[in-house]
Image (cartoon, grey):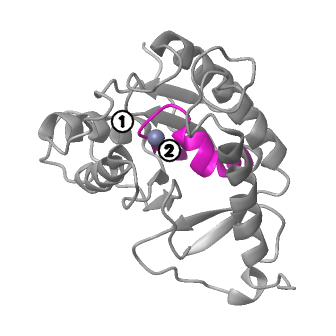
Amino acid sequence: MAEKPQGLDILAFGAHPDDVELGCGGTLIKLKKLGYRTGVVDLTEGEMGTRGTVEQRYREAARAAEILGLDHRSNLKIPDGNIVLNEENRRKVVEQIRRWRPLLVLAPYPDDRHPDHVHAGNLVTEAAFYAGVKRMFPGLPPHRPYRVLYYLSKYEFQPSFVVDITAEFSEKRRALEAYRSQFFNPEWPEEQTFVSSQAFLEAVEFRARYFGWSAGVRYAEPFWIRESLALDDPVPVFRRQIQ
Ligand SMILES: [Zn+2]
């Protein structure tokens, strides 16, 4: 008898390989340490990127997946620069959600400078809903995750909450360094871009420090949720001192 594929507790979607590492890499490392099964689905192969080949980026994504401790990583091969909200793409994302049956889905905040991040955020939002509608895309049994948690790319939002990644920040940095063709790397022979500049990598740190500082911890990743958060006991949640 064929083995039933095990599900995932957390499934993070990124428009391009490395988006997830930037936006919620520390959170994925933390969730793995807490014992959850984690996975990443990249929507595109990032073939429009200025630096690196598709093959190099697959190798880099696989190396980063090891550092994040992922149980699964795959790529939907939607064209880079053209993540459109159509039936074919909705079906692809719905199938991933039904196959892996995550409790939580992580997606890019759907207001951003990069149009692919906007479209990816909206595509995953729609798919997370339709995955629970039995008569949509019949085949795999329906599944509706508890929530979609949106992570930060470029444009900021007022976070609904932040995740303390103080203990995970150095591993997040290592996961980003796995993308040798993409981020600051003076040894890389191709032309310099905004993403490969030293300033970009510095921004990863100062933004994590900023959101950490706003919540009384050293490093944090911000998230936004559309619906309110209900707390059973607010006291332990607010036990941290804000200095
Ligand atoms: Zn991206």
Q: Is residue 138 magenta?
A: no
Which percent across, then down, holds residue 38?
59, 40
Residue at point 65%, 68% (across, down): 162
Which percent across, then down, holds residue 40?
52, 36
Q: Is residue 15 magenta?
A: yes
Q: Amino acid at mark 2?
A: Ala
Residue 183 left/right relative to 169: left
Which percent across, then down, holds residue 136?
14, 46
Disc ID at residue 96:
1
Camera-side residue: 94 or 27? 27
Which percent across, then down, holds residue 1?
42, 12
Camera-side residue: 43 or 128? 43
- For residue 44, what is the image quadrant? top left
- Toward the front, the furthest residue is 191
* Circle nearer the N terminus (2, 1): 2
For disc 1, the neighbor class at 10 Å (few under 14, some 14 to 19, many from 20) is some
User: In this rendering, is residue 227 above or below 80?
Assistant: below
Residue at point 70%, 25% (across, down): 178
Q: Amino acid at mark 1?
A: Gln
Q: What span is in magenta?
A: 10-31
Residue at point 53%, 17% (across, down): 52
Camera-side residue: 100 or 25? 25
- For residue 112, what is the image quadrant? bottom left
User: In this rendering, is residue 81 above or below 147?
Assistant: above
- Is residue 35 visible in the rendered image? The answer is no
